[in-house]
């Protein structure tokens, strides 16, 4: 990137790649809601505050969180990936089936499962950028294809037994914390560092915030979009390995409708569906909030169908907040432009 382009790159607001004040305040508000909800549930249910229940909530949340890390990259470029649950299932059955059916070593089977996830992500990215297919349609197609391939490979049933590696992963602890939770935190930290500290991360924000300005700044937006879909496929495949460890089986029938839960968690966490706004920390809070809602519904013995209703209301509220935040930011930007043209100092919004 030339020095001239670098100058323009730094000058674009969308290329900040940092956690904004609004993002920070939204995350603090979300954390307050979670703490308030936990306090209420502690009084309403004697089971809620037990170590076993909290570990169960967090371990269930890890699978959604890992998928949501990849989904965050895609949504930051104003895309969407509906194929994540199918990639997860395909990865799960491949990681076990290649060992049980064809005698592959567990390590090689895991590599193949991760490669399959990245391959579907690459197909999604190429379909969106080269064929100009809307992300919703492209990933809907690969969602159907991925689920179908998983059913064909597994015969429509879960595959067992799993290699000992998966059992050890599920049972393992690091400093007393379940290994899957530690792994999820490590992946989240790496993802946030990539988004906030690297040129690629700034390019992701720029592509989602203002693709035309990003291209003028010398960013290859098509490559950025393809990379985000590949990351999403990889993270979904990793989640497939985690769900294999949790169920101790190649989970051919798991993760039905998970893609909606993942998108909901990302949006609740403050990642804008319009692209260019949000961070991994906020997303994790969204995952925890959604997990607590589902746990609350279960502990209070609310009929299962109400779980979907409550989750849907939370999603609608998060989407409405996203629209309000975007309108608020655009109004502030218009005020600054008008003030600048009038030669008056603009008040911070």
Image (cartoon, rainbow, N blue to C red):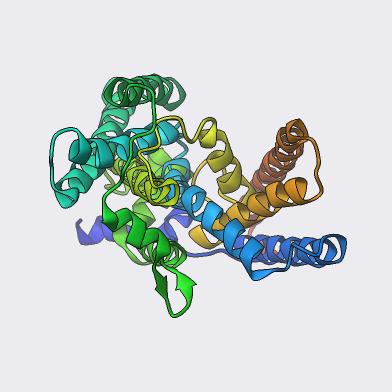
The tally of labels here is: 0
- Image x and y of residue 88, in percent: 38, 38
Closest to the observer: 99 or 306?
Answer: 99
Q: Is residue 131 visible?
A: yes
Splitting the image into 4 quarters, where does residue 273 fall?
top right
Q: Which residue is drawn at the image coordinates 14% and 34% (left, top)? A: 102
x 61%, y 51%: residue: 337
Q: Is 88 situated above or below 3? A: above
Q: Quadrant of the N terminus?
A: bottom left
Residue 308 in picture, x, y percent from top left: 71, 34
**Residue 341 visible within the image:** no
Q: Is residue 128 left or right of residue 310?
A: left
Q: Quadrant of residue 26?
A: bottom right
Q: Position of residue 74 (x, y in %)?
A: 42, 41
Q: Nearer the viewer, residue 279 or 290?
A: 290
Q: Please say if 121 is above or below 139.
A: below
Q: Where residue 199 sits: x, y (%)?
A: 30, 59
**Residue 223, picture quadrant:** top left
């Amino acid at each position: 990137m030339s020095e001239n382009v670098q100058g323009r790159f730094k000058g674009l607001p969308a290329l900040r790649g940092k956690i904004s004040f609004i993002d920070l305040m939204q995350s603090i508000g979300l954390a307050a809601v979670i703490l308030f909800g936990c306090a209420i549930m502690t009084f309403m249910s004697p089971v809620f505050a037990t170590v076993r229940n909290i570990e169960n909530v967090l371990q269930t949340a890890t699978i959604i969180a890992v998928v949501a890390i990849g989904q965050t990259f895609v949504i930051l470029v104003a895309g969407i990936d509906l194929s994540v649950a199918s990639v997860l299932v395909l990865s799960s059955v491949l990681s076990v089936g290649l060992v049980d059916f064809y005698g592959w070593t567990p390590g090689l089977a895991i590599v193949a499962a991760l490669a399959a996830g990245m391959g579907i992500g690459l197909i999604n990215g190429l379909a969106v950028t080269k064929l100009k297919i809307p992300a919703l349609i492209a990933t809907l197609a690969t969602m159907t294809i991925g689920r179908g391939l998983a059913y064909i490979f597994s015969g429509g049933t879960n595959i067992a037994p799993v290699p000992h590696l998966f059992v050890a992963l599920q049972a393992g602890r690091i400093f007393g914390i379940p290994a899957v939770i530690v792994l999820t935190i490590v992946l989240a930290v790496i993802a946030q560092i990539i988004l906030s500290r690297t040129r690629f991360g700034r390019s992701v924000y720029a592509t989602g915030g203002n693709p035309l300005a990003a291209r003028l700044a010398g960013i290859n937006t098509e490559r950025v979009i393809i990379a985000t879909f590949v990351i999403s496929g990889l993270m979904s495949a990793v989640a497939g390995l985690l769900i294999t460890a949790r169920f101790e089986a190649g989970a051919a029938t798991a993760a039905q409708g998970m893609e909606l839960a993942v998108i909901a968690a990302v949006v609740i966490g403050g990642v804008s569906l319009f692209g260019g706004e949000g961070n991994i920390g906020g997303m994790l809070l969204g995952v925890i909030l959604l997990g607590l809602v589902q746990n609350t519904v279960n502990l209070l013995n609310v009929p299962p169908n109400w779980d979907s209703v409550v989750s849907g209301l939370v999603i609608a509220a998060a989407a409405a907040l996203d629209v309000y935040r975007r309108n608020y930011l655009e109004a502030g930007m218009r005020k600054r432009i008008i003030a600048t043209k009038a030669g008056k100092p603009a008040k911070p919004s």
